Amino acid sequence: MLSRTARRLWKSVIAAKDESGQALLFVLIALALLMSIPLAIATTTVDQLPQTTRNLNWDAAYEAAQAGLSDYLQNLDLNGGYSVYNKTPGNTDGNPAFTSWVPASTTPPESYAYAPSTVASTGLISLQVSGKAGTGADAVIRTFDYTVRPSTSLDDVYWSNYETVDPALGSAYSGCASYYDPGPPSSPSSGCSIEFNGSDVLDGPVFSNDTFRTCGSPGFESTVESGNSNVAAGYVEAPSCSSPTPPSAFQDGVPTLVANTPPQQTIPNSTIAAALADGCEFNGSVTLALTAQTSSTPPTTKVAWSGGTLAPGSASWCGSGPSGTITVSAMTAGLIYATTNVTLSGSMTGGLDIMAGNNITLTGNVTYPAANIVTAANQTESDPSDALGLVAVNFIQLSPPAPGNPPAGMTVDAAILSLTDSFYLPNWGSAPVYGNLNVFGSIAQDFRGPVATVSSNGSTITNGFAKNYHYDTSLQTLWPPYFVPPNSAAWGATTYTECAQGSAKSVLGSGACT
């Protein structure tokens, strides 16, 4: 029989054996875990490698499409007529991107192809570009549908070539535009200059090739750019101004100097020809009264016309005889052209361009339906449903009715373009105070058209209209039909939509962007 001491010793030995067995078990478990971790890592890496490769190719396919877009825009910048080429056999200009994949890079292998189509009535281009990256099962093809357009006066709420009175307005102004205003002391005479003043609001981008003259604190609420390198600040004080304009009146401190862009000064013959095929051409002068039919489906505009002679061969919807009614439905590519003058007023909806070989006179408000004008959270305004273009070779002039008390002003919702002259109020120096001239859209003119006279401190209108111009941001992508583009300008993409992924939806496949 073991003694008490011996029994204690024996228990210690047994306990030690048990603990050594447990330790061995723990060691074996740890070794098993250490061996399984690398295997799990390797398995996960192998499983994720194809997905990682596809993710890289997904991004690379987008970069390839961007390379294709850049290639097409570069061709357009070099040749404005490049828009006539597409993937139609015999009409590709030999560019392989119209019919096959063109390498963009080799690591990873990327390539692109594109297919443009021009909307004849607007000059905008719908360009589908496909980008491909990778090879075999890992290849990714992504296709994008871009809206491509040139820079144009439609980019600005206000655009001018000269900031002086048009010499065509009388012998007193014959020397007003022999050069861009270099500023003092070589400026044109005081009778030539036209100023922005404290009653003016210009809510949108502003550009002139000339020097801005200012008095007081005009409301420039967006970017202001000048093409005149003669004046470092881009603006000078009006000669008789008693209230200098602070640089803070401009969003960027002073107008930004940009490249000079000459305007186009004729209506292209192709546009006039289109009036016969897709619109109405009148010989002589014509009076138009617009009426928006917003209750119809789709909304339409009825145009009552009189005067002039409808040219043979005009589109069937133009009617016939010495007067009649024209119906423009929704965004139909409506075009009305008169060889001499157009007189106009009323309300409209849809797409319409009204052009005159001489002048356009506005005898009253020209408006879109108020419900169609949308104000965004950032306070910009747009109308994605309506686009009216008013294009005159010479003047677009205001002939408002007698003002009430208080004066109600005048509203013009349109993209306004005077190719060789001005948008102006003929009796600006003697007219009564009309109130605000509310323009929603854009104004472009060769010479600055006066619409008012002001007090010496630039704060009070003494004759005519105070300017209240608001840019229609829809003009960045929605042009009035057949609107006249500039002579030459840089092209760019304004919007894009990504199409369904895969080769079936590429431009070399179905080309259907869904």
Image (cartoon, grey):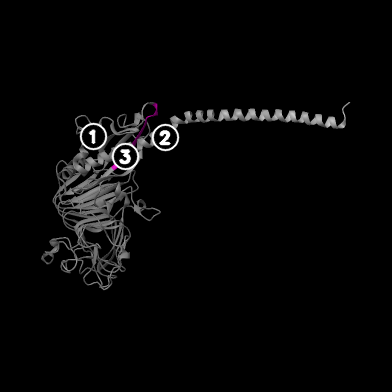
Q: Which residue is mark 3?
A: 66
Q: Residue 514's quadrant in the figure?
A: top left
Q: Quadrant of the N terminus?
A: top right
Mark 2, mark 1: which one is toward the viewer? 2
Residue 370 lies, with reference to residue 125, above or below; the image says below
Residue 349 seen by the camera: no
Q: Which residue is mark 1?
A: 86
Nearer to me, 422 or 163: 163
Q: CA distance from mark 3 to mark 1?
A: 18 Å
Residue 292 percent across, percent down from the top left: 30, 50
Q: CA distance from mark 2 to mark 1?
A: 31 Å
**Callout 2 crowding tier (Cα within 10 Å): few <14, some 14–19, many ≥20:** some
> Along the polypeptide, which appears first: circle 2 or circle 3?
2
Looking at the image, do the residues carrying marks 2 and 3 touch, with CB atoms under 8 Å apart? no
Q: Main secondary structure of the magenta part?
A: strand
Outermost right residue: 1
**Callout 1 crowding tier (Cα within 10 Å): few <14, some 14–19, many ≥20:** many
Nearer to me, 293 or 145: 145
Residue 139 percent across, percent down from the top left: 37, 29
